[in-house]
Image (cartoon, coloured by chain):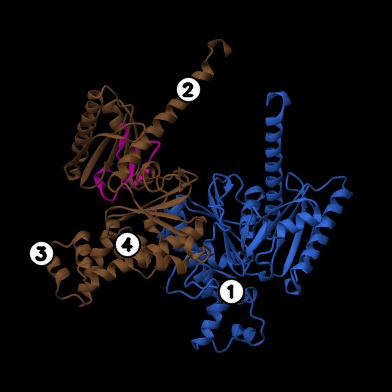
Chain colours: A brown, B blue
């Protein structure tokens, strides 16, 4: 079996999965990264050992570990280059450290890429050769699946970063520092910033969003609840999200010559509030694609997508290493051949 | 040898090329598409027969034809689905008709994709695995080269259409009908539209651009000459072009996780006027890539890029068909095996 990890800014989660993607054990703990990277890694190692024990209890063993982490990842060196949610891990050799402490092969990947591997393996994108995935959370992540393979570009530590596609250079500032990224229009943070802009402009002075803000209880989830309750500003923020996602997907389809998109992440729970403006925006902007040909799906795996994707990553890494070893063995065997 | 064709709205050109890309013959004629598609195809066939005769004169023969055409192309059926510069060819089975009249295998491709094949084979992108190509002409074309192969997406008739990436939804209307495409900021048409906007707003009332416009002599080339002469409006239009190209390349690099771009097409002759604003715009917007890592090259082949790419396409198509035949033969051989 393999372990799949999803390491976020607040929580870290683990699954024990077999080769067919069946889950045999799961565990969740807090990341607590402010206490320092060593404590976080201690907790991670303890969590993995519980997974190894769960496998042993079933008479099986763990052969590899896959881990999804938000940020820029050096896959080859197993290093977190830059993580906005886990700044304590910037430059930390997480893969090598876990390998040393666990005695298992560890494979790292960006969390949105892990999401893509999961949905392609077990979720909404099974059998689709070419598609773009977008995860809507605090920020916006993305992945490209090309010819059934996760696209990694020049292996620069990032690929599929559709959240930082600039869709409106006059738009709001993004966490990355640029103006008008998709993330600044279509994320949990963008919802909260939209409320703050309404306060700053004097538009928002009372009502449920105002009350939530005064109580310090404004979250993407509470903005969602207000929109469901008919609040005009909240509804507009989700319409803006749909507009931005439609524009971004139109660009991606024109650039890549494809027609499939898949949306996941916590904020995609507000699907009914943004999908109609998304499709309207997409159809008028993707001039190369006949109107009915665009296909936008919703994640089938929810929170488990990145976990399953990390498990898939572990199997792929394990098989690739075995393949290489197999090759090496066959090159050396029979020994008299050279 | 093979024939490579570049079929544009005004001219069509042909080269006769050997397997190493050496050119043995070239010819240029007018397309004259307004006289009807049959007359255009007659002229094309006559031009190809001159190429075949030139090969015969060297004791060689032509084995395949490649052709680059602006627009949406159905490669499998050899059909021009939609061509903005050759509207008479919309829905025309150009490949099949040329095959029938010439008795040679004919392979069609979008002209910007042909540009990409040419530059990767003989030009500035030799040996670069992953890069995006942008052709600056009357419009803006594009191609993606991924893992040393031309990317064709879902084979929908388009891919790499970076000219229709929307970079500013409040920007000028594009020929495609959408607002704020790269093409509406960074093409020959965009230069002319920029002059018209300055007239409409009352900014342009005299000077060299005004005089050219009054004489009906305003072209991208004459705007270029005015910019070289120090004209402020003309210089601004090229700065705007650089700004837009930098933003588009930043988006493409973030999405694809790559760092190489290549610019060609007639308007890229104004390189010195737009490359500094392009690099400035790219560096501040591509937040994932360290500032010095972006590499923007200029076409090495100029007008010959698409012609050489069409020749390359012909060789690739020829070899693939021979490969398939070879496979079929080996499956049938030895005959007693089944």
Q: Which residue is mark 1?
A: B189
Residue A131 horizontal/vertical position (percent): 45, 51
How far apart marks 3 and 1 lie (CA) works out to 54 Å
Q: Say yes or no: labels 4 and 1 on the same chain.
A: no
Residue A317 horizontal/vertical position (percent): 40, 33
Secondary element under disc 2, as helix, strand or loop, is helix
Q: Earlier in the sequence, mark 3 or mark 2?
A: 3
Q: Chain of mark 3?
A: A
Q: Which residue is mark 2?
A: A326
Instruction: Identify the disc placed on residue A186.
Output: 4
For the residues bearing labels 3 and 2, Cβ distance under 8 angstroms = no
The answer to whether residue B305 is above or below residue A157 is below
Q: Earlier in the sequence, mark 4 or mark 3?
A: 4
Secondary element under disc 1, as helix, strand or loop, is helix
Label 4 crowd (10 A; few <14 / some 14-19 / many >=20) = many
How far apart marks 2 and 4 lie (CA) works out to 46 Å
Q: Say yes or no: labels 2 and 1 on the same chain.
A: no
The answer to whether residue A24 is above or below residue B53 is above
Pick the front one: A213 or B296? A213
């Amino acid at each position: 079996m393999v372990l799949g990890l999803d390491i976020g800014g607040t929580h870290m989660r683990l699954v024990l999965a077999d080769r067919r993607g069946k889950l045999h054990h799961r565990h969740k703990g807090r990341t607590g990264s402010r206490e320092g990277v060593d404590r976080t890694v201690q907790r991670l190692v303890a969590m993995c050992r519980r997974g190894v024990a769960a496998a042993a209890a079933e008479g099986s063993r763990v052969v590899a570990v896959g881990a999804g982490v938000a940020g820029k990842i050096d896959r080859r060196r197993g290093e977190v280059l830059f993580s906005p949610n886990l700044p304590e891990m910037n430059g930390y050799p997480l893969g090598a450290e876990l390998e040393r402490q666990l005695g298992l092969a560890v494979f790292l990947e960006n969390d949105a890429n892990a999401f893509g591997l999961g949905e392609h393996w077990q979720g909404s994108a099974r059998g689709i050769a070419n598609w773009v995935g977008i995860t809507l959370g605090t920020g916006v992540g993305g992945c490209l699946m090309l010819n059934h393979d996760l696209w990694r570009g020049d292996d620069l530590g990032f690929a599929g970063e559709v959240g930082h596609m600039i869709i409106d250079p006059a738009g709001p500032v993004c966490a990355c520092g640029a103006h008008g990224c998709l993330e600044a229009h279509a994320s949990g943070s963008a919802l909260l910033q939209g409320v703050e802009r309404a306060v700053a402009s004097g538009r928002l002075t009372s009502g449920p969003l105002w009350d939530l803000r005064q109580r310090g209880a404004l979250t993407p989830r509470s903005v969602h609840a207000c929109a469901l309750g008919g609040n005009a500003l909240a509804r507009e923020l989700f319409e803006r999200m749909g507009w931005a996602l439609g524009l971004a997907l139109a660009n991606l389809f024109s650039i890549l010559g494809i027609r499939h998109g898949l949306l996941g992440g916590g904020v995609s729970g507000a699907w009914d509030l943004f999908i109609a403006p998304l499709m309207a925006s997409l159809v008028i902007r993707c001039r190369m694609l006949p109107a009915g040909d665009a296909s936008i799906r919703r994640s089938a795996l929810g929170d488990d997508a990145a976990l399953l994707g990390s498990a898939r990553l572990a199997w792929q890494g394990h098989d690739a290493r075995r393949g290489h070893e197999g090759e090496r063995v066959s090159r050396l065997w029979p020994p008299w051949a050279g």
